Amino acid sequence: MSSQPTNKEGPIEQLIRERITQALEPTSLKIINESHLHRHHAAMKGVTSVETHFRVKIVSEKFDGTRMIKRHREVYRLLADKMKASDGIHALALDTKTPAEIAKAESE
C-alpha cells in the first residue's frame, strides 16, 4: 500500500463532509485524510481501508457559547456509526472554532 496521501475524496470523507455541513453549517471546513501516515501502526495491520485517520478543522457559529469538549462530542455523535465500524474511522483529530475565535486569533 502507498504511504502517499490521496487527493481523491473517498466515501468516508464525503460522509464526514455531508454530516458536518448539514448539522453545523460551517463557515469553513477542512478535512485532511492522514491515513497514509498511520499504515505502519500495529493497530492498522490487516486494515485495507485508506480512510481511517482524519484531521478535521471546523469553523461554525453553532459552536458559539459551547466549550471545546461539547463541540467535540457533537462531532463524534454525528460520526458515531463510522467510529464504531471495523472498516470506519479509527482516529479523528478535531479543531473546532467559532468565527469570532478565528477573528480574535487573527487580530493578535
Image (cartoon, rainbow, N blue to C red):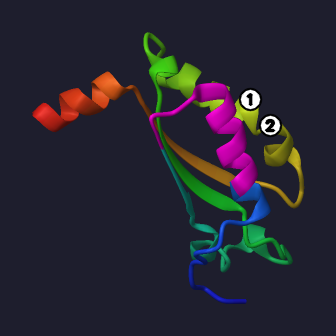
x and y percentages locating residue 51 in the rendered image: 72, 65
At a point 74% along the width and 29% down the height, the residue shown is 77
Dot label at residue 80: 2
x and y percentages locating residue 96 in the rendered image: 46, 34
Image quadrant assignment for residue 25: top right
Q: Secondary structure at mark 1?
A: helix
x and y percentages locating residue 76 in the rendered image: 69, 34
Q: Is residue 108 above or below residue 69?
A: below
Q: Are marks 1 and 2 in contact (CB under 8 Å)?
A: yes
Q: Is residue 80 above or below residue 55?
A: above
Residue nearest the observer in this picture, 27 or 98: 27
At a point 45% along the width and 21% down the height, the residue shown is 61
The kind of residue tagged 2 is: Ala
The residue indicated by pointer 1 is 77
Q: Secondary structure at mark 2?
A: helix
x and y percentages locating residue 87 in the rendered image: 87, 61
At a point 62% along the width and 36% down the height, the residue shown is 21
* Magenta span: 14-28
Dot label at residue 21: none
Residue 77 in magenta stretch: no
Is residue 61 something that shows in the picture? yes
At a point 67% along the width and 77% down the height, the residue shown is 39
Residue at the far right in the pictured view: 86
Mark 1 vs mark 2, CA separation in Å: 5 Å
Q: Is residue 26 left or right of residue 14?
A: left
